[in-house]
Image (cartoon, rainbow, N blue to C red):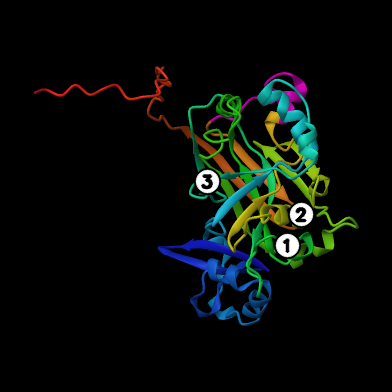
Amino acid sequence: MRIARWVDGADIGEGFVDGDSVIPFPDGLRVAEVLAQGLSAASVLYERREVGAARPLADVRLLAPLVPASIRDFVAFEEHVEGVSASVDGKSEVVPEWYEAPTFYFTNPHTVRATGDVVAIPETQRLDVELELAAVIGGVPGSEGENLDAASAAAHIFGYTVMNDWSARDLQSREMKVRLGPAKGKDFAMTLGPWIVTADELEPFVDADGFLAVRAELFVNGELIGHDLVSNMGWPFPELVAYAARNSVVVPGDVLGSGTVGNGGCLGELWGRRGGLDPRPLEPGDEVRMVIEGVGEIVNVVGERVAAPAVSRARERSRARFRAEAHTAH
C-alpha cells in the first residue's frame, strides 16, 4: 500500500495511491489517524476503499505524506561519516564511538517540504542535500512504544518514505565546532515523499541479515551524483527504532531517517574525498532528484536565498558572582 496526502483544487485529500489514482480513506480518516491504528487496520481500510471516488494521480499535487510528530535523523552509514567528516570538520575519520550505538539528532518537523516544491534556502555558500530512507512509526495494539527491543520495534515500523535532509554545510561546520548541533545548518528544510510505502511492500528486499537491500540514487540537474544500497547501514531499521525508544518513547507519526547513504549520497562526502568543492555546491535553480527502489522519487528545485536578521555576537561579561548593589534615589 501507498499512503499519501494531496491537494485537489482547494481541497486536501488523504488516502491511498492505487496504481495511477488517489482514493480518499474511508470514513474521512486522516493519515495521522491511520498511522495510529497501525498497519493491520490500514490493510482493512484498503479493502474498503471506494474505487468510485478515485482521482487521477496526475490531476493532484502531492503534499508531504504526513505531518511528523517528530523527526530523528540517524547517521548510520560508515562510508558517509568517513567522507563528510573531512568536508565539515577538516579531518576524515570514523570515531570509535560511532560503532557503539546509532547516533541521531532531532530536526524541525515544521519545515517539511513535498516533492515538487521549490525550497527556499538560507544565506549559505555550501548548500548540500542528503539522500536517505526514512521509517515512519505506526501504532501497535498493547504497546506504548517505550523501551522496545529490536523484535518489538520492527512491528512499530508502519512504512517508509524518501527523505532529503537539506544541509548548509558552512553553517553546520561552525556550529559543530561548539560541540552541539547540527541546528541552523539543517532546520530550514526537509523533504519527505512522495508517499509512505507500507513495510510489508518492502519485505522482498530484506536480506539475510535483516537489512533493506534497495538501491538509492541522487541526481542533480539530471546527472547521477551517487548511488548506494540502503543495506550498507551499520544497523537495520528495527535497531534504529529500538535505540530511539531506549529509555524514551516512539509514537505514531514519528519519522526516523537512516542518515545519508554512502558513495555520493551527498555532495559533502565527495568534497571531503576530493579535497575541494567538486561537484560545486547547489545554487538557486538547480534540480535535485532522489530515487529509492521500491519506494519512489522526490524532486525539488532550489529556491532563492532568504535574508534573515543579523546574529549578535556573544557579549563579554564580567563573570561576577553577585549582583551590584542598586543605587536608589532618596
Residue 18 belongs to magenta span = no
Residue 39 vs residue 312: left or right?
right
Q: Would you call the spot at circle 2 few (<14 residues within 10 Å), some (14-19), or many (20 or more)?
A: many
Residue 86's image quarter? top right
Q: CA distance from mark 1 to mark 3?
A: 23 Å
**SS category of the residue bearing label 1:** helix
Residue extent of the magenta highlight: 269-283
Quadrant into which the N terminus falls: bottom right
Residue 79's image quarter? top right
**Residue 239: image tag:** 2
Quadrant into which the C terminus falls: top left
Residue 238 vs residue 138: left or right?
right
Q: Tell me which residue sits at (66%, 74%) in the image.
A: 142
Instruction: First in sequence, mark 1 or 3: give its number.
Output: 3
Q: Tell me which residue sits at (76%, 21%) in the image.
A: 274
Residue 147, above or below 141: above
Q: Disc 3 designates what residue?
A: 108
- Prevalent SS, magenta region: loop
